[in-house]
Image: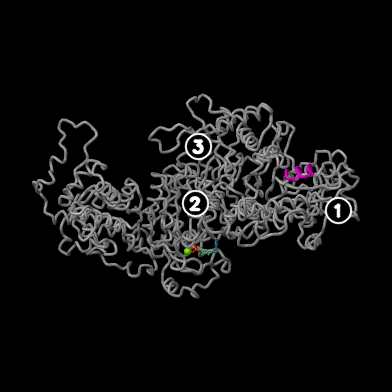
Amino acid sequence: MNRARMVSKLLSQAPPGTPLVAVRAWLGVGARGKASAPPPPTALAAEPFLNGSSSNYVEEMYTAWLQDPKSVHQSWDTFFRNATRGAQPGQAYTSPPTLAEPTPHHVPLSALAPISAGPPAAALSQKTIDDHLAVQGIIRAYQARGHLIAALDPLGIDREGVAERPATTMPARTVVRQYADAIEEADLDRSFTLPMSTFIGGNEKTLTLREIIKRLEDTYCRSIGVEFMFINSLEQCNWIRQKFETPGVMHMEPQEKRLLLARLTRSHGFEAFLARKFSSEKRFGLEGCEILIPAMKQVIDRSTSLGVESFVMGMPHRGRLNVLSNVCRKPLEHIFTQFIGLDTGDEGSGDVKYHLGTYQERLNRVTNKNIRLAIVANPSHLEACNPVVQGKTRAEQFYHGDSEGNKVLSILLHGDAAFSGQGIVYETFHLSELPQYTTHGTVHIVVNNQIGFTTDPRMSRSSPYCTDVARVVNAPIFHVNADDPEAVMHVCNVAADWRNTFHKDVVIDLVCYRRNGHNEIDEPMFTQPLMYTRIRKLKPVVELFAEKLMNEGVVTKQEVKEVTDKYEKILEDAFQAAQTETQVFNKHWIDSPWSGFFEGKDPLKATPTGVHEDTLFHIGRRFSSVPPNASDFVVHRGLLRILNSRMEMVNARTVDWALGEAMAFGSLLKEGIHVRLSGQDVERGTFSHRHHILHHQKMTKDTTVDKSQYNILANLYPDQAPYTVCNSSLSEYAVLGFELGFSMTNPNALVIWEAQFGDFNNTAQCIIDQFISSGQSKWIRQSGLVLLLPHGMEGMGPEHSSARLERFLQMTADDPDILPAFTEDFAIRQLSDINWIIANCSTPANYFHILRRQIALPFRKPLVLMTPKSLLRHPDAKSSFDEMTEKSEFQRVIPERGPASENHQNVKRVIFCSGKVYYDLIAARKDANLEDKIAISRVEQIAPFPYDLVKQECLKYPGADLVWAQEEHKNMGAWSYVQPRFATALNQERHLTNEIQRHTQGSVEHGSQSWYEYWFPWLFPTSSPTDVAADSTDSQSSTISSHKRVVRYAGRPASPSPATGSKKTHIRELKQLLEDALAL
Ligand SMILES: Cc1ncc(C[n+]2csc(CCOP(=O)(O)OP(=O)(O)O)c2C)c(N)n1
Ligand SMILES: [Mg+2]
């Protein structure tokens, strides 16, 4: 209910005869209880305790008091009694009795000002009080709403006419609203005592109203618009007031102004040079917001002086090359060669120049400190890199022990349209204060050129400002006219100081314009004639600022020219140097180098993943126990049962899914590998199987949060690596992006994101498509991130069934028509060459090994794992310690090991499958008494496809037909991926498509090698390949068999929906699938 209506209703319910006039006045309701009547300012403001934030509380107190005067505190009782008795505003309140013993000289306030006993002894005139209160209201109004009339727009289109407001006489009504009526011209020269909520006076305690208004307008309504009064913390509000209101805060020394001009000159000169040299190339130039470069440098300088050593940045296309060069100091030659269009001299497919990242270490000349600067590579998808930057920043902080974010700072740049339009911005803001996701404050800078491609703000957002999304986390927002360089510098200083003081996000909104079209080839007059007519008349900011400094006598015309010429020469020299280059190198654009990780390693050798039995016992027992040495820690009875059954399994040398996972994590932690598991409800596990955090069940009466927790895996060994397990916010896009960023920082960490159900991964599709599947190819950036995606048809309906395995497989970059040579290092070569690994493990031991293999590999690859639901508790889905100890390893294919495997010739069919359907198949096969006739093999690693093992398995049973059985519908699951690969494996074909022939004919040649030989040298070994088909007389080089074996499909028919909503249909479909698979 609307607040005024609620109060009005409340008053109308008051007992008849209650003298309510005073109460109505206190609560801001008109004398006749009309909710729409403005509250009498004197009444509202006269009580010191009754401010805006407490009025809801007053209403609640009043309702309670009406019902039972004893139900409220004595002070409220006194207040309401006095008010209803008709006490004047300002006189009804008496302070509550102090809890401390009264001191000998203590006199209660009520004793000094007896409320109902007539007027106070030396009463101020009511007019004086009212006027002071009005002035107080005016000051507050400017603080809250001054930004509404600030001259923010260099074009003067937004808030038309505001920029030209003459020096103030009367306060602006837009800002002060009802207080405008309380002021008369004559009041302007009266002096007023300044309240504690303002700093405009400096050392002065009183000012004339004229001066007060002038100072407020100068602070809040010129080139800077400060939005901060929505912040709940009084301390933070006061801090901001002080930073902007204190007289003289904007002062800049002449040498600071000269530095600013030099930086602006470079920013401007860079774009002008590119425009001249590459006039028809897209570069998404910064013209119209050249101040961005000095602004970023100012934030960096200031933060560096406050102790920050590393900056992790994310930004869109606009001005990116300029930032790379002038902020990060990426060599100009590297940038120019991107324009020249040279061949790539190293691995990777590359990306367009305005998406590339960088990493630079350099000396900050202003502070004389060494700093690290990284700009994260990003796709075209605006704002998508935000969570990636945050994850990378968090990881840097974590591994540097920077628990407060004093050393590592993230800076995110945004376009105005994208900042307000993209939901990922909101999702990322919501990570900003979460304990395991915070980066302790991000500095956001918006290049607010008041347009998005061809769309005006009024058509692209419903909020007044493009920055309003930041209000959700109480971040202050500093709007600033980008054509006032000095104002921008001040705002940047305050932003850096804010972040350093409060470790919270802050937004700098650079209100600017875009001098050209969306890109340099676009014609903006087609769609924005008014805007561009104005823009054409505007001088570049560097010229405006140079003129200002010349007028002030800070620089001479000659000095301005020298600075310009000097930079021009630097550009020209680099341009000439770039002309001599013959290749570009993707490695020059790496944003997260892993120094020392690859060096000295055999690139095709993984360390073993099995562990010593003692380790399994130790981890298993710890994982099954209550916290040691904490007898008062009460564990839930249900959990005690779970721990006991875990212990029984451990003693029997077996593991279920949760134990297998814990063994993998625990053994890695023991080896010094940090493990981080993040996602919705991961601590307990969506299916209540994991329980990595135990919660003390005993609460004291006043406990509001469960405080006592025990992280089991963090307490396995005294010298182990840290274990982080954290329930995330209810987000996939941001959290997956965050974990990807986290995984980029340290290759010696196992970073895992788990989806609540696998199908939710599609709300993070952009991170999967743009970063995870293609990141290494585009940006030669590796990541060992693991995605755990609960997957499987359990009769739970269309949702929650499919993690969309088919999509991951479709994006897998291995050619189905090429049968790789079966060399000894076949398996690891495949892993090295692929873009990601897709697997569906059917045993806890295999899950254990594949997790450990992520770290054992000499490179990093994303791993997408379909994970089980019902198998978590399936009695057969258990593994013995023997499958996890030394000499055991991950099994890409688990072959048939039952009776069928003992008499190959007798076997009529080999069924291949993946995941939990295996357990349905073996049960049905047993029922049908076909265990010696049908072999069932599990393809555990689906991609890269285990050609060698699949072929081996097929050859083992020469008389058997082949079936692929899956529970997913035919147009889903692994079928479309495995079918052509089975064909290639079975028929030993190196099926040359037209495309390959074209390449091999030499249209794209690398020396004397064909394109294919160049990129896949291991497919064309010079030595003879090892034929792994042990049982076969076939060899890979034999001619294509005339009798081609094919694999047949058994499973659900094609369907638009991943699963039926009917349990009955689900069971019928499963029965049908099993019959199809087993019918001989
Ligand atoms: C997620 C996404 N949707 C659409 C686009 C296409 N696009 C590229 S730039 C642009 C306009 C961006 O406007 P703004 O954020 O204001 O940045 P500006 O170009 O004005 O600097 C659009 C719609 C995109 N790159 N990403
Ligand atoms: Mg824009």
Q: Are marks 1 and 3 in contact (CB under 8 Å)?
A: no
The span from disc 2 to disc 3 (Cα, nearest Å) is 23 Å
Image colouring: one colour
In the depicted structure, whether residue 406 falls above or below residue 226: above
Q: Secondary structure at mark 1?
A: loop
- Residue 566 numbered tag: none
The residue under label 1 is which amino acid type? Answer: Arg
Pick whichever of labels 2 and 3 is earlier in the sequence. Answer: 3
What x and y, as percent, mark residue 35? 27, 61
Q: Secondary structure at mark 3?
A: loop
Residue beneath disc 2: 428
The residue under label 2 is which amino acid type? Answer: Thr
Pick whichever of labels 1 and 3 is earlier in the sequence. Answer: 3
Alpha-carbon neighbours of circle 1 within 10 Å: few (<14), some, or many (≥20)? some
The boundaries of the magenta stretch are 919-927
Residue beneath disc 3: 401
The span from disc 1 to disc 3 (Cα, nearest Å) is 59 Å
The span from disc 2 to disc 1 (Cα, nearest Å) is 52 Å
Residue beneath disc 1: 1045
**Do we see residue 209 in this rendering?**
yes
What x and y, as percent, mark residue 869? 64, 44
